[in-house]
Image (tube, rainbow, N blue to C red):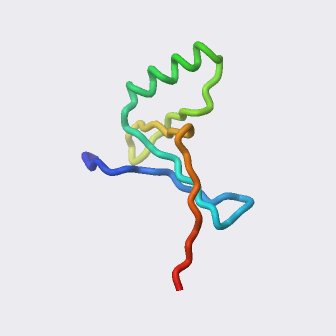
């Protein structure tokens, strides 16, 4: 807490084990609640922003900004 570094949720791709997906996590709850509610009112569904808890604090998982990277092996 109080550390201002990027935080990500990571998982390996089920079909390509060399791909690792990163989902940015934000602590800006109020900002993303407003965006979430606006999208929900407009579209009836929001699948780009997910709220959850990390280390006991409410956080936002920004699915809309997720990105892959490849596993690089150094010899």
Most extreme residue toward the top, as rendered?
A: 41
- The quadrant in which residue 54 appears is top left
The answer to which of 72 and 31 lies nearer the viewer is 72
Q: In front here: 71 or 8? A: 71
Residue at (53% x, 52% y) in the render: 22
Q: Position of residue 18 (x, y in %)?
A: 64, 67
x, y percent for residue 20: 59, 60
Q: Is residue 22 left or right of residue 56?
A: right
Q: Tell me residue 70's x, y (percent).
A: 59, 64
Q: Is residue 13 left or right of residue 68?
A: right
Outermost residue toward the left?
A: 2
Q: Is residue 24 above or below residue 28?
A: below
Q: Residue furthest right?
A: 15
Find residue 56 and report its image quarter: top left
Q: Position of residue 12 (x, y in %)?
A: 62, 60
Q: Could you tell me which residue is drawn at 55 percent across and 45 percent down? A: 66
- The residue at the point 56 percent across, 20 percent down is 39
Q: Residue at x 37, y 37 (%)?
A: 27
What is the number of callouts on the image? 0
Against 54, residue 10 (above or below) is below
- Residue 49 drawn above or below residue 7: above
Q: Quadrant of residue 47?
A: top right
């Amino acid at each position: 807490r109080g550390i201002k570094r990027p935080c990500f949720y990571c998982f390996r791709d089920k079909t390509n084990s060399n791909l690792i997906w990163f989902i940015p996590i934000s602590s800006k709850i109020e900002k993303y609640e407003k965006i979430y509610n606006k999208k929900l009112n407009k579209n009836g569904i929001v699948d780009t922003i997910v709220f959850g808890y990390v280390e006991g604090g409410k956080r936002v998982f920004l699915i809309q900004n997720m990105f892959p990277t490849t596993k690089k092996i150094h010899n």
